[in-house]
Image: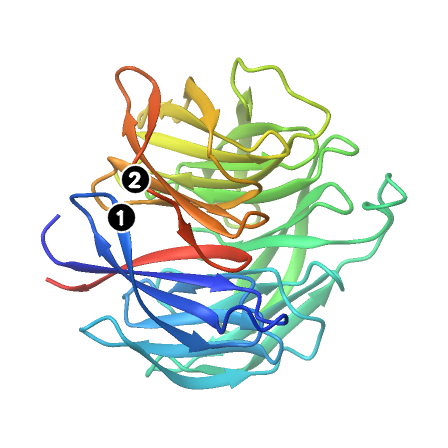
Amino acid sequence: MKGKYMAYVGSYSYNGQAKGITVYDVDVEKGRFVPRCEVKVDNSSYLIASNNGKTLYSIADEGVVSFRIHENGSITRLNSANIKGMRGCHLSTDAEDKYIFVSGYHDGKCTVLRLNEDGSVGEIVTAVFHKGFGSVAERNFRPHISCTRRTPDGKFIMVADLGIDQVKIYRFDEKDEEMVLMDAIRCDLESAPKCFRFSEDGKFFYLLYELKNVIDVFTYETGDRLPKIEKIQTIETTGKVPLTQLTAACSMRLSNDETHLFCGNAGDNTVAVYDRDKKTGLLTFSCCLPVSGSYPKDICVFPDDKHIASINHETGSITFFTVDYEKGLLIMNGKELRVNEPNSCMIVKVSK
């Protein structure tokens, strides 16, 4: 765990209580963030770092904003790119940082933009709008794209749409740079598939449902025309803890060594911890405990996998916990940090 790490937290800024991105030094040993400064971004609702750790990307009112990450952890703005649609809710890059994928919750649009060699965001490569009607009049009556990722084999783009209860699978060829619909995972009605994450070896992915409050585990095998996908497990997002009517699964992270998975639940404001078998991909419930805050919109796992931070949107706080995997406990680690309406968090290694 040697090296210097930084944490970047994106917040809404419309009420003047935050600038957009708060920059923290990370004390890995103590499992804490130390505030450094704020950087102006209009309503940073989601942020990620490039896979090479040199660039930070944030959703903003003007589209996507890129920042150079310096060795001392400070960030300077590179550029912003218009996505020609309503503001996004989720970002991801592919393994080689060639493209960035923007998920549009409000307009049901998935936008793919090119990334330049210096990390800045280039032009729009392709985009698709989802169509169709879901089931719940208040929420699921139209497409709401909530997560987009390129598959680890680079052949497909998977797009989770919690409005129409599907994960659509598009073929993506870098020669044509077009998304061609090939298949879809059709989920239960009113389940709201919100986000998914692949294991590093590309053999498994984990799909979180916001309304059904479960995680589905799938195996993934590449293919020329279609990937081979098989569901092997369904597990509740609160584990053995009974669900309340208010529960809505809202965040999910794998530990860095991928032996554990964390799931945040709004409503009952808990984080569930699961043990993960790296060979089979299967999850085993460990514990589900309160985060001492409201609406854990994101979970941040420290580089040592011994600590986590809960990004609590409604209470405007970050709470820190030491994880005791053997006993199945989350032990609160010091005082909370105040930050206005935080949405997401990214820890980045900035120097060796």
The residue carrying mark 2 is 334
Is residue 56 placed above or below 92 in the rendered structure?
below
- Spatial CA distance of label 2 from label 1 is 8 Å
* Screen quadrant of the C terminus: bottom left
Q: Position of residue 34 (x, y in %)?
A: 27, 58
Is 143 on the left or on the right of 40, as rendered?
right
Q: What's the residue type where badge 1 is placed? A: Arg
Tag 1: Cα neighbours inside 10 Å, few (<14), some, or many (≥20)?
A: many
Which numbered dot is residue 63? none
Q: Position of residue 18 (x, y in %)?
A: 51, 69
Is residue 263 placed above or below 196 in the rendered structure?
above
- Count numbered badges in the picture: 2
Is 228 on the left or on the right of 93, as rendered?
right
Label 1, secondary structure: give it. Answer: strand
195 and 297: which is toward the camera: 297
Is 65 on the left or on the right of 257, as rendered?
right
Label 2, secondary structure: give it. Answer: loop
128 and 88: which is toward the camera: 88
- Residue at 71% from the left image edge and 71% from the top image edge: 86
Q: Position of residue 57 (x, y in %)?
A: 44, 70
127 and 276: which is toward the camera: 276
The residue carrying mark 1 is 32
Residue furthest to the right in view is 137
- Residue at 52% from the left image edge and 60% from the top image edge: 340
Is residue 123 placed above or below 22 in the rendered structure?
below
Q: What's the residue type where badge 2 is placed? A: Gly
